[in-house]
Image (cartoon, grey):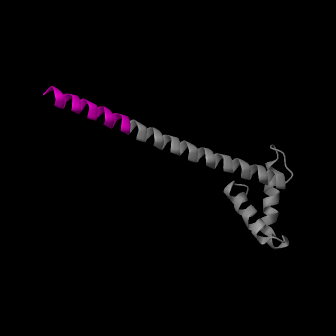
Amino acid sequence: MDGWLKTLVASACVVVIAGGGWYAWGEYSDYRERSAKTELMKRVRNELFMLASAGESEPEKVRAMCSVIREKPDTFSNKNFAAQTLRNCRALGFI
């Protein structure tokens, strides 16, 4: 009777450790995903501000640039650039 009790306790420990590891790995994966998304949003936002020659406190310049791109996308020689920039403007709420 003593042997099966030790086995039961050992099995319970393994289950608890495995469950804790699974939970920790899931949280870590979510954290990495959120961090990557946040970093991408920062880079895209910085690029829009750079293209608009705007400082951090001048979002109206970015809105104006996004409006021009939306109204006249055909004026750009690279249509893909205009479409991508417009998509970024929409994603970040400047349009």
Q: Where does the image place residue 82, in percent across and percent down from the top left?
A: 77, 66
- Identify which residue, 87 or 47, lies in the foreground: 47
Residue 4 position, x and y percent, is 17, 31
Q: Is residue 4 found inside the magenta-colored segment of the image? A: yes
Residue at figure coordinates x 42%, y 38% from the top left: 21
In the rendered view, does 61 fall on the left or right side of 85? Answer: right
**Magenta stretch, residue numbers:** 1-18
Magenta span contains residue 17: yes
Left or right? Give the position of 42 relative to 58. left
Q: Residue at x 22, y 28 (%)?
A: 6
Q: Residue furthest top?
A: 2
Q: Which part of the image, by quadrant, shows the N terminus?
A: top left
Judged from this view, the residue extending furthest toward the front is 3
Whether residue 45 sits left or right of residue 16 in the image: it is right
Residue 95 percent coordinates (x, y): 72, 59
Residue 10 position (above or below residue 59): above
Report the residue at 28% width, 33% height from top: 12
